[in-house]
Image: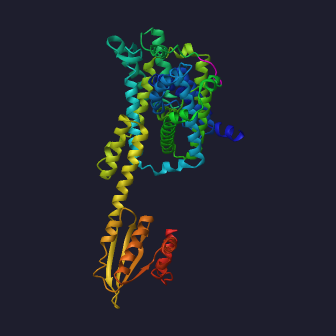
Amino acid sequence: MTEFVRKIIPNAKDDVLAGITVSLAMIPEVVAFAFVAQIDPLVALSGAFIIGLITAIFGGRPGLISGAAGAVAVIFVHMISEGHAKGMAFDVPVENMGYYYLLGTVILMGIIQVGAGVLKLGRFVRLIPHSVMMGFVNGLAIVIFIAQVKMFSHKKLEIGIDGVKKYINIPMEGTELYTTVGFVLLTMGIVWLLPKITTKIPAALTAILVTSTVVILGKFKVSTVGSYIREGGGAGLSGEFPTPNMEFWQYMPFTVDTLTFILPYAFLAASVGLIESLMTMNLVDELTETRGNGNRECVAQGAGNILSGLFGGTGGCGMIGQTVININAGGRGRLSGVMMALTLLTFLLFADQYIEQVPIAALVGVMVMMVIETFAWSSFRILRKIPKADAAVLIIVSAVTVIYDLAIAVFVGVIISALVFAWENAKRIRARKHIKEDGTKVYEIWGPLFFGSIQDFNNKFDVKNDPEFVEIDFMESRVSDHSALEAIFALVGKYQDAGKKIKIKHLSDECQALMIKASPKLASVIEHDIDDPRYHVMAKALK
């Protein structure tokens, strides 16, 4: 605790103001995603408080803001509706059963994330190429911008013939639309202009306060946080301090059927949550020129989700929009995340009537400025300068993020990048051939030998027409995987079947041991003691 306090003191003022700003920007986005998942906004806001607080204190990246993110919320939509149906089919029907399944899924999601951190899987985020990272940032910026455009509408409840409730968006028109756009532009103007005058006052928080004051004093009829929540069927922001949800233990059936039902959703949500959190962590690393701890972040995210589920909240992860707002407002330490969570709780407990008066236009203006700052505009400039494959990956990841979701986009980007890498390296295998004075034919292999280059490697040899003595030199090559070992083993067999003598030189110690273990007779084929200074230098370099 002493270490924690020592670290938050140097930047305390900026962290506190940044945390307050982020909490205001958090509310409409979390509420909007709650409507998407068809859950009570207070459930989502409660989850945002718990996850945000836990990850701020124990996470691996100071300055990263976590909450009930939309990337996770959309996964639960079908599960909740199907859970409601399962609950009504019980011998004793349970209303709102989908909510209890949601809590179970969030807890299981957290357990999976903790396991990922314990197993140190967070390190694999380093394997994500820069082109995928840029595509992720651009795609997510577009998704956040589209979400802000949807704020220029009113929600209307419709009940279908089958009794299913559905909310539709009715676009703003006329004076209300023009007024709202005007206040959005006012907010954006303050966020853009104020840092040019002074950096001692957080621009985003100042913009929200100024715009809210103008709207309240001028009595303009525009959509506010309160009206937005009530249009979606919510009762307002007034809530209670989160306590353990005892009804979950009463109604949740702890059976194999339940585990089978929630496990796929929990695994997908855990994967999406970790990917978005770790990618956001990488972005903060770049912005602040510091390095976070991915495995610690995995454990903290998991612990936050477990507690959120136990206390009746929904799942969440790192939120890139709120994180960028925090960084731009000067938030660098853990105190900014703690302040965000505590301010959010304060709003719910004591200041709901004031926060509900904040115009949506002010929050939309802040988010749009964040989108402008987050989008990697340099990607347009470099598209023609980088390899075509990387440019394609960047565009594909951006598109898939917008059309489907983040996890699929990242997986697609990494797979395409890996295949391109394998293909490019497969073309680098070379064989330089020459005949020694004693008639021995030497093949000097250049380039990596792995599963992708095996076919080209085999095509370099002419077993039928080669002389009686053949030597294969791997001095400038690297045997990378089991497929490469099998290719060498098969090639040796072909020469031996043809009655020819073959020697293999400059294989690494590890490769020699594996080949001899697979077939002891190969010990006579491999040259072990080689008086060649170049080989010893190369062997040490490879180690």
Q: Quadrant of residue 46?
A: top right
Q: Position of residue 344 (x, y in %)?
A: 58, 24
Q: Position of residue 454 (x, y in %)?
A: 36, 66
Residue reaching furthest top?
Answer: 219
Q: Position of residue 306 (x, y in %)?
A: 60, 34
Prevailing secondary structure class for the magenta stretch in the rendered image:
loop
Residues in magenta, as a range: 239-243
Q: Position of residue 358 (x, y in %)?
A: 49, 17
Residue reaching furthest bottom?
Answer: 438
Looking at the image, which is closer to me, 393 or 166?
A: 166
Looking at the image, which is closer to me, 309 or 204?
A: 309
541 part of magenta stretch:
no
- Position of residue 445 in the picture relative to residue 318 (left or right): left
Residue reaching furthest front?
Answer: 91
Q: Is residue 293 visible?
A: no
Q: Quadrant of residue 352?
A: top right
- Position of residue 216 in the picture relative to residue 390 (left or right): right
Tell me the residue at 53%/26% (across/down): 21
241 part of magenta stretch:
yes
